[in-house]
């Protein structure tokens, strides 16, 4: 009897546990094919209604390279003479240049740099672009650029139109722009004359003292020139007006992520506007040679020196340039 009771208990437990045992068993074929769910799509690297901010550095090179060879000449000695007003005292035999008639000369004698924007052949700079693409292929924007011209700064801004052709992470593009540029300059060679002055009783170079009878200057206490230095310098003359700027270029962008890219491109820039060429002007230096006897003038001879100087023009000639840019783009 006990064996029968145990047998019925075992069978009952088996039937009770059967659903749980076969719940994770082999699946039954339903006759329907299972569909695999696709992976989430990768973001679009280039999109319509996209805002781009590009920050870049640039290498600029001039269309007109090199320099003019401007010889170091004294413009007042074109006829072979450069006579500055002077005073000679017969009693002492001392000959001096008159400061009152010759305060120093500075004459522009010629243009040195062929390029009239950088004042050299190449330079560096940078800038930024903001663009809005109303479609994947076309956008409008604003560009600002700065150029380290020789001894000063040049900068400008443009409105741009860009077309691109995205494929994958890459997008070659072309663009054009129109705007303005200001600053920059040209280098010119200048003739300079500087007087080295001393006063009565002071010591000359070499240790020789200047003394007059009674230690009183016959020139009413005015300082006088011991010697005269003539030298030449090459200095920048800055552009002082705004010129129009046109730009055409092509480049390539690579998106590292959906929102960050790298860009590299090349453009040619056209500077244009009204031009005013360099002009020549005649400079006249006038004074008098004075002959004294014991401090009393006894003869006066007029002295007139003339020289031709350049007056720099203002315009847009010889200012076109190329630009190579490398930068990073942030896309939103």
Image (cartoon, rainbow, N blue to C red):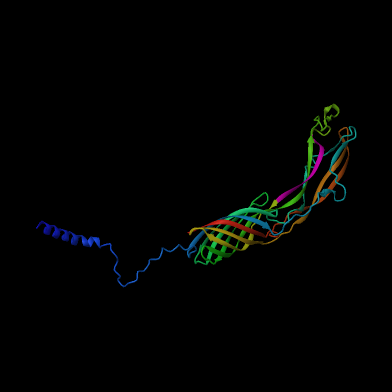
> In percent of the image, x 24 and y 61: which residue is there?
21
From the viewer's perspective, is 112 left or right of 272?
A: right
Residue 200 appears left or right of 120: right
Quick check: 44 above or below 207?
below
Is residue 239 among the parts visible in the rendering? no
Q: Quadrant of residue 40?
A: bottom left
Q: Is residue 205 left or right of residue 56?
A: right
Residue 99 percent across, percent down from the top left: 80, 39
Q: Nearer the viewer, residue 174 or 184?
A: 174
In the rendering, at what x and y percent does residue 100 appear? Answer: 79, 40
Residue at 23% across, 60% down: 20
Q: Residue furthest bottom?
A: 31
Residue 125 image point, x, y percent: 62, 53
Instruction: Give yes or no for residue 227 being in the magenta stretch.
Output: yes
**Nearest to the observer: residue 153 or residue 274:** 153
Please give the name of the residue rendered at 86% of the width and 28% of the height, measured from the top-left corner. Answer: 213
Quadrant assignment for the N terminus: bottom left
Q: Nearer the viewer, residue 68 or 228?
A: 68
> What percent of the width, then of the height, locates residue 105?
78, 45
- Snapshot quadrant of residue 195: top right
Query: Which region is colored magenta?
Result: 222-236
Q: Is residue 10 left or right of residue 50?
A: left
**Residue 92 included in the magenta stretch of the image:** no
Residue 284 in view in this figure: yes
* Chief SS of the magenta region: strand
């Amino acid at each position: 009897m006990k064996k029968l009771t145990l047998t019925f208990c075992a069978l009952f437990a088996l039937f009770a546990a059967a659903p749980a045992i076969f719940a994770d068993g082999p699946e039954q074929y339903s006759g329907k094919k299972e569909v695999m769910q696709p992976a989430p799509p990768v973001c679009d690297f280039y999109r319509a209604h996209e805002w781009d901010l590009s920050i870049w550095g640039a290498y600029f090179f001039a269309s007109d390279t090199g320099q003019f060879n401007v010889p170091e000449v004294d413009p007042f000695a074109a006829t072979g003479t450069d006579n500055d007003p002077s005073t000679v005292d017969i009693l002492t035999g001392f000959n001096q240049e008159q400061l009152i008639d010759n305060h120093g000369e500075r004459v522009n004698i010629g243009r040195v740099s062929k390029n009239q924007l950088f004042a050299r052949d190449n330079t560096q700079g940078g800038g930024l672009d903001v663009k809005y693409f109303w479609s994947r292929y076309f956008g409008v924007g604003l560009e600002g650029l700065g150029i380290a011209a020789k001894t000063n700064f040049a900068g400008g801004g443009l409105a741009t139109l860009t077309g691109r052709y995205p494929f994958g992470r890459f997008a070659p593009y072309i663009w054009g722009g129109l705007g303005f540029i200001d600053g920059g300059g040209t280098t010119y060679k200048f003739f300079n004359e500087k007087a080295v002055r001393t006063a009565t009783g002071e010591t000359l170079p070499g240790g020789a003292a200047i003394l007059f009878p009674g230690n009183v200057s016959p020139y009413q206490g005015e300082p006088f020139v011991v010697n005269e230095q003539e030298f030449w310098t090459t200095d920048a003359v800055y552009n002082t007006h705004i010129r129009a700027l046109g730009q055409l270029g092509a480049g390539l962008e690579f998106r590292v992520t959906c929102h960050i890219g790298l860009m590299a491109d090349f453009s040619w820039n056209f500077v244009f506007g009204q031009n005013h060429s360099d002009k020549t002007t005649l400079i006249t230096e006038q004074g008098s040679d004075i002959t004294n006897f014991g401090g009393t003038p006894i003869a006066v001879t007029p002295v007139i020196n003339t020289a031709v100087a350049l007056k720099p023009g203002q315009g847009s000639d010889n200012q076109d340039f190329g630009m190579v840019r490398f930068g990073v783009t942030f896309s939103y």
